[in-house]
């Protein structure tokens, strides 16, 4: 049984799963009209994001074709992408005025 | 496209016909609410402030109260004051005369306490409500509508389904000559570059960028990661990871129309088309601001589900999360989850929403109205002294 995901923009390195996906399950999504398949490496709840390619520590997370944050760990294709491995770049008062430099 | 509504003396079109009980401070709110509960046809603004406020904060509270009473859904106004508060009841009364609406004021200290103020208020409210009940609806053009755009309790289905659908409806209304208000400045952080490109001129673009910069600086001045409050814990459970992701999803609810101008909180647009209002991301304060800005109707998208309404404008709830729709059917009016399943286009869902706006304008009650959800709250911008 395949899990489904939606890729919003071809630039994106994450897709949004539209059903609960279990680790080991295949996830299918459309990219430029072509069906792509990846294997989930984590359980990923409905509406959460999955990495559709490898993302290295410090690289941008792209969704809607725009930057939504930065990887705080190396993320493999098929891993769950969320607050445990992504930080925001905006509204970071905790960084003592050093945020948003890059 | 035609709708039916109530023509006000100032020329504006209402789609509801309320007697508004307007407490000028928290000290007169209880009496105002009790009058509204007693007399059919009334509604009340639940005011928690109105006293011991200074400068821009005092002016903002004042503007919110007065402009709420100017909303065309209000047919008659009863100002309820204590008598010694910062928002002076007599001044509010004088400022509302220009609306031409039936208008009265009751001051608790002058009437001699709760019971006498309540009795007098009920008598006036009953008279006004009966007067309003005699009004007949007139034909009007849909271009007279101002639509408030809100999203709350978002999850990732909001950015994928309900917000784009909401944006399609807003675009349709703007094309028909109407007005839309996008709010929630916090939820533009990370998406402002996209919105600024849609500004009608460089001045509006600069204002927009400044607005978002100010909001982000206020958050950063607290020395914390904004993720402590935005996205909310519920947003995060729903899959939204950062404020940038939330904002990009939120922005879809404003469709693709050109941005005509930037409004202060609770300000009334001076033209037609899409406007951006400076409000917080907190739903109730945001909706209260847009309704004070003249929105006769609000469309409100949600992923997690939320029950809230407004005392003056009907609020239409929309979700693209099937499970939430099934679970909270008594709160949510429209299910757009077929978009997520790839079985409905965003444009088609936008038409469904526009048709619902027309039905509600013509008198269909929303679920929030039926369940008496009348949440409202003023956006406070300084401490109370």
Image: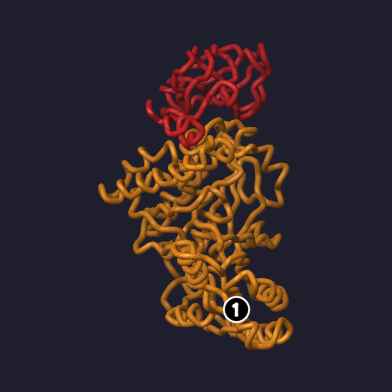
**Residue under circle 1?**
B81
Chain A image colour: red
Name above or below for residue A63 compared with residue B313: above
Establish if B197 lies above or below B95: above
Which residue, as the protein is rendered here, is positioned at the far left? Answer: B202
Q: Residue at x 59, y 77 (%)?
A: B19
Residue B66's spot in the image, x, y percent? 49, 72
Q: Is residue A77 left or right of residue B34?
A: left
In the displayed structure image, the side of residue B87 where residue B237 appears, left or right:
right
Residue B244 showing in the rendered view = yes
* Colour convention of the picture: by chain
Q: Residue at x 55, y 47 (%)?
A: B151
B166, B35: nearer the viewer = B35
* Residue B36 against residue A9 in the figure, above or below: below
Residue at x 53%, y 26% (from the top left corner): A6
Chain for colour orange: B
Rendered location of residue B55, percent (x, y):
45, 64
Which chain's residue wears label 1?
Answer: B
Q: Is residue A70 above or below residue A90?
A: above
The percent coordinates of residue A14 (x first, y second) are 51, 22
Counting labels gives: 1
For label 1, count other residues whose C-alpha is less than 10 Å away and answer few (under 14), some (14-19) or many (20+). many
Quarter of the N terminus of chain B within the rendering: bottom left
């Amino acid at each position: 049984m395949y899990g489904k995901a939606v890729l919003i923009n071809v630039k994106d390195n994450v897709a949004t799963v539209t059903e609960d996906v279990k680790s080991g399950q295949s996830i299918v999504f459309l990219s430029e009209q072509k069906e792509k398949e990846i294997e989930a490496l984590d359980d990923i709840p409905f509406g959460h994001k999955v990495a559709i390619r490898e993302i290295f520590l410090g690289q941008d997370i792209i969704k809607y074709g725009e930057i939504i944050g930065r990887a705080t760990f190396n993320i493999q294709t098929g891993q769950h992408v969320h607050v445990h491995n992504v930080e925001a770049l905006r509204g970071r008062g905790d960084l003592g005025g050093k945020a948003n430099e890059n | 496209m035609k709708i039916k509504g109530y023509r006000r003396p100032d020329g504006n079109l209402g789609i509801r016909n309320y007697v508004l009980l307007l407490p000028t401070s928290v000290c007169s709110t209880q009496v105002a609410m009790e009058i509204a509960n007693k007399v059919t046809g009334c509604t009340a603004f639940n005011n928690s402030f109105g006293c011991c406020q200074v400068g821009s904060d005092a002016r903002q509270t004042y503007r919110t109260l007065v402009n709420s009473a100017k909303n065309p859904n209000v047919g008659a106004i009863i100002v309820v004051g204590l008598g010694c508060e910062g928002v002076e009841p007599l001044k509010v009364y004088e400022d509302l005369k220009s609306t031409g609406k039936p208008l009265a004021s009751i001051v608790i200290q002058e009437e001699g306490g709760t019971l006498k103020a309540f009795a007098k208020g009920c008598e006036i409210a009953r008279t006004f409500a009966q007067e309003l009940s005699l009004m007949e609806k007139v034909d009007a053009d849909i271009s007279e509508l101002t639509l408030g755009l809100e999203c709350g309790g978002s999850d990732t289905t909001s950015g994928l389904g309900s917000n784009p659908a909401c944006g399609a409806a807003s675009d349709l209304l703007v094309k028909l000559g109407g007005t839309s208000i996008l709010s929630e400045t916090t939820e533009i952080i990370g998406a402002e570059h996209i919105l600024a490109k849609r500004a009608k001129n460089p001045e509006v673009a600069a204002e927009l960028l400044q607005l978002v910069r100010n909001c982000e600086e206020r958050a950063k001045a607290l020395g914390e990661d904004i993720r402590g409050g935005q996205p909310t814990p519920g947003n995060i459970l729903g899959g939204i990871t950062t404020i940038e992701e939330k904002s990009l999803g939120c922005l879809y609810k404003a469709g693709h129309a050109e941005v005509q101008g930037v409004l202060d909180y609770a300000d009334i647009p001076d033209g037609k088309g899409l406007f951006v209002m400076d409000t917080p991301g907190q739903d109730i304060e945001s909706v209260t601001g847009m309704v004070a800005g003249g929105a006769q109707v609000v469309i409100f998208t949600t992923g997690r589900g939320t029950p809230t309404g407004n005392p003056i404008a009907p609020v239409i709830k929309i979700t693209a999360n099937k499970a939430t729709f099934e679970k909270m059917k008594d709160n949510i009016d429209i299910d757009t989850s077929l978009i997520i399943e790839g079985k409905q286009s965003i444009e088609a869902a936008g038409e469904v929403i526009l048709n619902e706006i027309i039905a509600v304008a013509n008198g269909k009650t929303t679920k929030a109205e039926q369940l008496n959800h009348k949440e409202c709250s003023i956006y406070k911008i300084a401490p109370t002294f």
